Amino acid sequence: MSKYLELFLHPQELASVIQLKFVRKPLFSINDTIATPELKECYKLLTLTSRSFAVVIMELHPELRNAIMLFYLILRALDTVEDDMTIDNKIKIPLLRSFHEKLLLEDWSFDGNSPNEKDRDVLVKFPSILKEYHKLKTEYQSVISEITEKMGNGMADYIEDEQFQKDGIQTVKDYDLYCHYVAGLVGDGLTQLIVLAKFGSPQLLEGSQLFESMGLFLQKTNIIRDYFEDLQDSRHFWPKEIWSQYGETLDYFTRDSVAGVHCINHLVLNAMEHIEDVMTYLSSISEQSSFQFCAIPQVMAIATLAKVMNNPNVLKENVKIRKSTTCSLILKSRTFKGCVEIFQYYLRDMRHRLPVGDPNYLKFNLRCGKIDQFFEEMYQENLPVGIEPRKTPIYLKVQERSKWDQKIETTVLKQERFVMQRIAFSGLLSPKAFFLLDLVSL
């Protein structure tokens, strides 16, 4: 289906596209992203590696913008070494284990990637990254170096693990550990940076569960979605402990879609274990651009999780949400309340689409019930007259975060809605599209 037809069929998303592209304004100026030739080169590399990440990073508070941009590029460079199957392991493994040491150098680059490797320029032009990295605050450099070392060693360990290379991930415990190395560590580093900048509660660093869940929820969603693509590349990331309950081999699901869908739904249920932690984490972020940076990937993940659940197309193609849906999610996730409503919407959708005959039907509904109770505890808005809310830790966090929601509502969202009303009245949007926009925005 063409993107124009999709927009025609989803007019509320058309309105979101217009609002995102022409009405919404960045919180901060981006003029400082071209302050030096090297910095300009770094942001060019960022855009080339991921246009979506570039958009959210560019809108960060200047205190953290360059640090997070460089953190992303350095880990992208590390990942480009690990992903390239043309690099001999005798070169790859020592390079992964020592990659953090390259950050101490004034000048270093690597041109050993295949010419067809998409992100090889990040390594070829690494001197620009190094020059800007050394301008960061010492404490930011330390965080980036620490996470790079842990991730590089984790990648090398998996390459040297013969059973993993041959048979993939075996247990759910191994599944969580793998996701820790490729995503949980990223959450660790980002959280340290946010707390150092005083943009989030220090409680985020008390134990690893919250930032681990932020990374694991994203990574598990991607692993479920990427089944067909990974299978074609002979990579096995679905844990055998789960998939073996539904088939004899991982590729069996390409021939038996019913069993494959049951396995998908089981994996979705596993990913849902992280939702309460994700929401607790988001409620602990105060600075608005950092909140949006953390929230957008999470709402994209729950939308993707709903897209893949009970969907046999996952077994034969890469399933993605519409770009216009992404625009709607970006706009609505600017408040914590908006994020909660997004999660509630997609959880209801998933609940309605799961057939009674699914092996995990009861467990899935029990899990949704626990999440619903957690959401109710956050706000406690439907209490009987005269009953005071219970001042639980999550309730108090959400009350504090709601003050920031109110600020963004009065200073930004209200003005955008006014502009969108004028656009609607001018005839550029149909009344139906604007009415639906109003429902989404409020």
Image (tube, grey):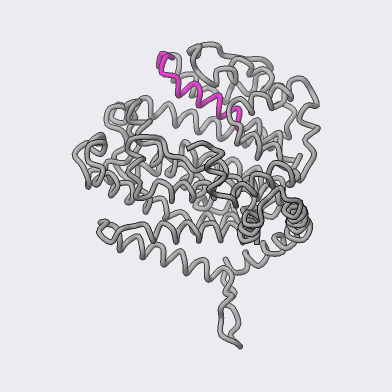
In the image, the segment drawn in magenta is 72-89
Along the line of sight, the residue nearer the viewer: 351 or 119: 351
In the rendered image, residue 88 lying in the magenta stretch gets the answer: yes
In front of the other: 124 or 102: 124
| Depth check, front residue: 410 or 2 | 2
- The chief SS type of the magenta part is helix
- Residue 441 in percent (x, y) is at 65, 58
Q: How many marks?
A: 0
Q: Is residue 435 above or below residue 128?
A: below
Please tell me in which quadrant of the rendered image residue 313 appears: top left
Instruction: Residue 182: tell me if it is visible.
Output: yes
Residue 214 image position (x, y, % from top left): 52, 48
Can residue 283 be seen from the camera position used here? no
Q: Residue furthest bottom?
A: 386
Residue 118 place in picture, x, y as percent: 52, 20
Q: Residue furthest left?
A: 248
Q: Relative to 196, does residue 43 appear above or below in the rendering?
A: above
Q: Is residue 68 magenta?
A: no
Q: Is residue 265 left or right of residue 219?
A: left
